[in-house]
Image: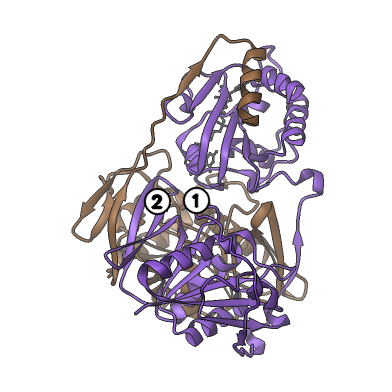
Amino acid sequence: METILFIAHTEIDGTLAKSALDALSAATATSASLAAGLVVGLIGENTQSAANQIALCGASKFLAVNGADFSQARYASDAAASEALAKAAGATIIIAPATSRANRALPGVAQRLGGRADTHAAGLGVTDGKLSVTRWYYRQRMEAVVQRTTRPWIILVEAGSQPTWLGAAGTAVVETVAVVLPDSSKRTTVTGIRSPAADAQTIRPDADLLFVTGAGWTKKQADGQTHVKEAEEIIVGFLKKTRASLGSSKSLVDLGGEGEAVLPFLTHLNQVGQTGATPRHPKGLSTCCHGEEPHTVGWRFINERRAISLDPNCGWARGKADVLYVADAFAVMKKVNEMA
Amino acid sequence: MSIAYQIIVCGSIVPDPLQTLEPASSPTGPALKNEMMLPAVLDPWASHALYEAANLAKTTPGSKVWLVSLGPKAKLQQVMMSVAQKVPFELVALDGPSGGFTEASDVAAALAEAILAIPGLDRSRMLVFGGWESASRGAGATMQMLGERLGIVDQFQGVDELKVQSDGALEILERIEGGRHQVSRCAGAPALLGWATGNLPEPKNNPQVGMANMRLMMPALQKAKAVKLAGEGLAFASVSLPRQMRQTRIVKDQSADAIAREIVEWIKK
Ligand SMILES: Cc1cc2nc3c(=O)[nH]c(=O)nc-3n(C[C@H](O)[C@H](O)[C@H](O)COP(=O)(O)OP(=O)(O)OC[C@H]3O[C@@H](n4cnc5c(N)ncnc54)[C@H](O)[C@@H]3O)c2cc1C
């Protein structure tokens, strides 16, 4: 029989993030479909309030690796903690949220345990008592359903791909799993987080709308001139009004490296596509972007898609967007800002 | 304090991003239709790792860069002809499949064996680089498994910046949620870094670098060891293309006002 271990790390405030609760709902559903035991394994400085938050999830046991050594998102300590939790639980299937922290550490833990890992899982299902994981290959260009006989099998679940676990809080009895970190695992220290200034914080994973800017914003317009300053005002104005998340084409973020006049708030972190991000938002609006394949694969998880481009033959017209407005984005977005 | 690093970059080849891909079945499991015919490029995030490695080697005298690449020999050779023009490195080639449906753990085992066989390897100077995800499997798992096999527990993923401090420590910026970076300080080599985009533009072709690289590249390709990836315990129940086409409504010859009104309504819906 399978034993499912749900692993999550706590946030700075000691709670579990939404991404963890998404993965938890996958873990509880899988445990029910496989009639397998569920164990919770938490990692953090102090995990009691996180355990209480999910006390009623149906787990038979709550294990935790606690302490200051385990508060930071560091490979060596996270891997050691996860390995100890997996062993203590006797886990055959390990389900965790695909956060940057878990993505960093858990594939290495699979190696330690002689298991396998599947990351970026977009779905889990059970048929005839067999677990399958759905995930994307070739940067969201192909979807495959994977099954494995090797155990333990570590599955990292993409945030937003599952319903969020919404159970009530309670009081959990937590068993501590002792992990002593050798000095060789403390050669790295997390010294801080670098965030853009508040007004430059343009990446908003929880926003309803992804607003994508393309290189067209910096190109010569009908009057033979570029209008970068105006583009900046329009884009920033729109973001302020709608609190949309800002994405970009590669061409536009690359311009910065080539010394051309560009939009100062755009970095590679905004880039959507094959070599950029694949964010999840209910809606996406693309402006001044051609909609080439390496860009639009990054839109896989954007449900409703609209685009404004001057080019009626751009990629968006060919089945990539629901609506293409063949129009001048400067003119349209100025009006949008007036009305929004 | 300046350390002469041994920088080992792991990177394979992937189909050119502009190609349309279609799944096909092969005797060893899923594959791509006409896989061997598709034009290929060096995996994009791995290529950023290579440029960052070359840049670090240039600024830390005595350092050297290897590129360890597992792929079908003939295709590797084609792609390496152009990669060789970019930055100085020595190729370690492994002849085997490079497709996305191979098992990360098997690839890690093959890479570890090849790395450990590099003559004169010195762990205390070793930095292992790669892309944080491939553009084929897209798993972001191979590097961690490789690190474990090499006994490296100072591992970083989604790296956009590495700065060597005056005391030899490494300051590393990794991408985390919400467009932010986590800053870490690592005491020094050995360390493993899975790169995201980094900060460097693609280097211009340099024929002299190309010539120097090629001298060692052809022998490396000739002696590329054949590698089989077992994919034990792994099965694909299906591989399919997503429903790609939407019925695009094309709105032309409308005033900016009318379009803006429609967009605002849609956003607020
Ligand atoms: C290995 C590799 C990886 C890649 N990865 C990515 C990736 O991750 N993400 C990505 O985005 N790209 C990626 N690309 C690049 C991709 O192929 C395209 O080159 C890129 O997406 C084009 O960006 P763009 O549409 O902004 O610019 P352009 O192609 O220059 O298009 C600009 C568009 O703006 C329109 N325009 C101009 N002015 C206006 C106006 N006033 N109003 C409305 N429209 C206007 C033009 O009609 C045009 O359609 C990759 C390429 C390669 C080779």
Label of residue A249 in the image = none
Q: Which chain is brown?
A: B
Query: Which quarter of the rendered picture does the N terminus of chain A lie within?
Result: bottom left
Q: Is residue A233 left or right of residue A33?
A: right
Q: Earlier in the sequence, mark 2 or mark 1?
A: 2
Mark 1 C-beta to ligand 1 under 8 Å: yes
Q: Is residue A196 above or below residue A121?
A: above
Callout 2: helix, strand or loop?
strand
Q: Amino acid at mark 1?
A: Pro
| Residue B189 visible within the image | no
State the CA–CA distance, disc 2 to disc 1: 8 Å
Mark 2 and mark 1, same subunit? yes
Ligand 1 - quadrant of the structure image: top right
Q: Which residue is mark 2?
A: B14
Q: Is residue A196 above or below residue A175?
A: above
Q: Which chain is purple?
A: A
Q: Quadrant of residue A328?
A: top right
Query: Which quarter of the rendered picture does the C terminus of chain A lie within?
Result: top right
